[in-house]
Image (cartoon, grey):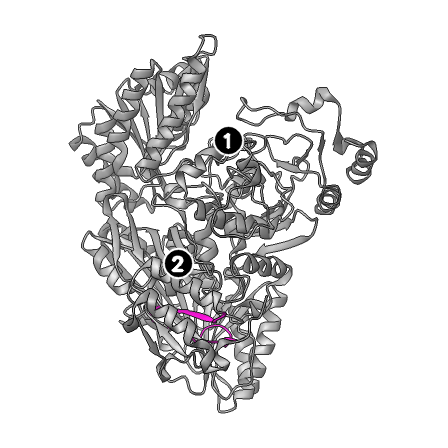
Amino acid sequence: MAAPTSASKAGTEISGPWDDLKAIAGAERLRASGVGDCIAGVQPQMVLEPSSEAEVAAALRCANAHGLAVLPRGGGTKTGWGNPPMRADLILSTARLNRVIEHAWADLTVSVEAGCTIQNLQNALAQQGQRIAVDPLWPERATVGGILSTNDSGSLRIRYGALRDLIIGVTIALPDGALASSGGKVVKNVAGYDLPKLATGALGTLGVITRANFRLHPLPRNIHSFTFTTRDLADANRVMLSVQDSGLTPTGLQARFGAGTVPAVDVRFEGTDVGLSVQAVALRKLAAPAIETATSDSMWQAREELWSSTELAAIVKFSVLPASIAETCGRICLLANSLDVRWHAVVQGTGLGWLRLEASSASAIHQMLHTLRRELEQVGGSLAVLHRPPAMPTIDAWGSAGDAFPLMLSVKQQFDPRGTLNPGRFVGGI
Amino acid sequence: MHARILQEFRTISGDRGLITSQEELKTYECDGLTNFRVVPQAVLLPRSTEEVQAILRVCHRERIPFVARGSGTGLSGGALPVKDGVVISLARMNRILEVDLPNARVVVEPGVINLEVTGRVASHGFFYAPDPSSQSICSIGGNVAENSGGAHCLKYGFTTTHVLGLEVVLPDGSLAHLGGKTLDTPGYDLPGVFVGSEGTLGIATKVTLRIVKRPECIQTLLAAFGSTSDAGAAVSGIIAAGILPAAIEMMDNLAIQAAEAAVHANYPDCGGLLLVELDGPTAEVEALMLQVDEICRECGAGEIRVAQTEAERAVVWKGRKAAFAAVGRISPNYIVQDGVIPRTALPRIMSEIERLGAEAGIRVANVFHAGDGNLHPLVLYDRRIEGQEHAAEILANRILELCIEAGGSITGEHGVGEEKKMMMSKMYAEPDLETMQRVRCAFDPENLSNPTKVFPRPRLCGETPGEYRPHPLEVAGIAERF
């Protein structure tokens, strides 16, 4: 990647770009950044809030031409994910692009601007008895563009798939100012490359998502959740696998593990009353000898709880095969005990887990993450660091992309040859 | 092709892995879309990833374009050979390499037949969900290239939903592993762009698939309506009721007649036939099927049957799956189209198709995946009648334009291939296509992998993306921009 000299080094040089950006989006849309605009410990100079897709594209072209490093931002809930930016000049906020453009409820699709919060989107869809079948972190603040860029998925994924399976169209602004759409407003469409998937999980390093189209699902008629406590990790894994190996159709299946707590498995069904009661009977039979216990209101927000008081904690996402969950968590437990680290994990039946590690010694966490990542990568898994305690030594957020990395670099070069977008934040320093 | 290069190819894939005789090459001159034909210079049949790599290294060194081919059942000319190029058939790479039931994963070579995957895991209660009508002969590699769908993708998703990892030989012969057996591997979702790229980004040599647990209960309802609009109203009613069937299929009277003539599916003679399949836990299916039945009656359904056993379901589906071929019974020639519209536009588009057909004096039989708005109009004509083939082509294209105007797509599952590449500029604006081409340039800067497909014109990867400037050939009037 070409590394243009940072425009932020000399204040006199940069009056040009700021004036140009004001001309594009209006002077009132550009402001100096504050402490709250810090991204992974790096302070950008300015924040721009364009009011339209065309303004986003024009602002991006302008920043690119001036060699400014641009950090796209939605609700700002996950800006700490990824490596610290190598350069940081301008936060490009999608906050003002917050409209639900078209809810074609009879077609079960929606077109929405990137800055719309998930909660606002869900509220609009619910008026017609529909939803986008995702349950990301902090929906009241997280935006469509933000959850797409970070590929955040929760418990609904086991039934409805990830965002990649729900997005059917996307518009992105590119550093050269192009505003490109692909996919469309219909669920089934194989015309051209599937760029909605490429943009999903790209951490805003290829373009800035300005709008997205999704397929929708009906709101569930009834919901019934269950919690079972199991005697150990292996039994919890057994319950999860037997649910998946049965004719049952859970819309949530997760385990909650941690030092000093009894392993618990949560299961959720949605459907007709009669369907739910039959599934409940079958589930209890499958789960035995695990003990059914009271459910809690917050169990499906268990991921969010991992982020409570993060000063001494690291939070990571790991991915393993569904049948390896107990083995992985057993290994986590052993490592944590040997390094005096407290741990707590929420693991979905898909094999995706979120792990919180807390210790007075940041280097113990660091050591544990290194070891765990190495071991997971050896068996085809992965580990991404989402949050690190300020005192912890640097660690790459992503791990290895293997022999696909040269291809990823090449894709990045094609979309953002000057390295304008989120420089250094993604895999392998992309 | 130079004898030295052919000898090199022979050394790589053996005597039986190289076809050069004109007679045998003719077998490969087209795929399922037979009105485009090009005889390739040679056909190679590698047996391993290493052989594919070695072949592509030679192609790269000599700048020989190549086209990968699975079973050749594609319907958009995606596997049409390119002149001066070679075809690489993956038919000999047909092993199922790994079956991992606890994790619901199967790893296959690209030449494995779609239905064989289900065949291998069915006794354990699993199936492979994408089910294109050609599933008994089409290959997984071809499915990956086309992002194949099928009747059940309304609920289960497409090939891309079920491909977790790919081993890919890139056009320069290097190897890359995209995705993997686990979810959310670090980096860009490259399996997401590779699946459905129609052979333009390289050749998949191993595919990691997700398999699905067979539902406890499957029921298929067959309902006869007076017209396709009434049937369409029932589809909207089902969706509005918050029911997500595994499949909703519709056939019009002409398609029913064809299916009856071909396979005697015992369909009622009616204006619009609906098949609605529900699956899931038995109690859930039974409760929802009652509602579907009620909605269909409210929308004017006459005869309604529910197939509950495997045998009964097979009969109901037989007519639908045979529909394309069955049309051969009522017309000497036909064009299959593959447009998509928002479901709600169905009645309007249907009457428009009828009007256009009447105007052109051409019959159109209609088979749809009604749940997701994927239309398969079968434009019937007789090549022996002068001018009719041309009129049929015009009508088929006009139908796609209607789909675009309605906010839909020119292809739901057959791909763009050779057939619809000129329509791409009608569906997408220039910056959209330019952006897709950037992906192409990242994977295949020399433009060797199925180079003439999908896009209306190849982009030279040295070009700076940006404002359009006419090519000197255009200025000189030698080449045309579409």
- Residue at mark 2: A157
- Residue at mark 1: B76
Residue extending furthest toward the front: B476
Q: Nearer the viewer, residue B86 or B367?
A: B86
Q: Secondary structure at mark 1?
A: loop
What residue lies at 55% left-to-right and 87% top-to-bottom? A364
Rendering coords of residue B203 (x, y %):
63, 44
Q: Is residue B462 magenta?
A: no
Q: Is residue B444 visible?
A: yes
- Examine the residues drawn in magenta and state their main secondary structure: loop
Could you say which disc has been placed on residue B38 in the image?
Answer: none
Q: Is residue B443 left or right of residue A384?
A: right
Residue extending furthest toward the bottom: A360
Q: Is residue A94 visible?
A: no
Q: Which picture quadrant has residue A37?
A: bottom left
Q: CA distance from mark 2 to mark 1?
A: 33 Å
What residue lies at 62% left-to-right and 51% top-to-bottom? B167
What residue lies at 62% left-to-right and 45% top-to-bottom? B202
Q: Is residue A416 above or below residue A278?
A: below
Q: Is residue B160 above or below residue A53?
A: above
Q: Which picture quadrant has residue B428?
A: top left
Rendering coords of residue A292 (x, y %):
33, 68
Q: Are marks 2 and 1 in contact (CB under 8 Å)?
A: no
Q: Secondary structure at mark 2?
A: helix
Mark 2 closeness class: few <14, some 14–19, many ≥20 residues within 10 Å: many
Query: In the rendered structure, which segment of residues is drawn in magenta?
Result: A67-88
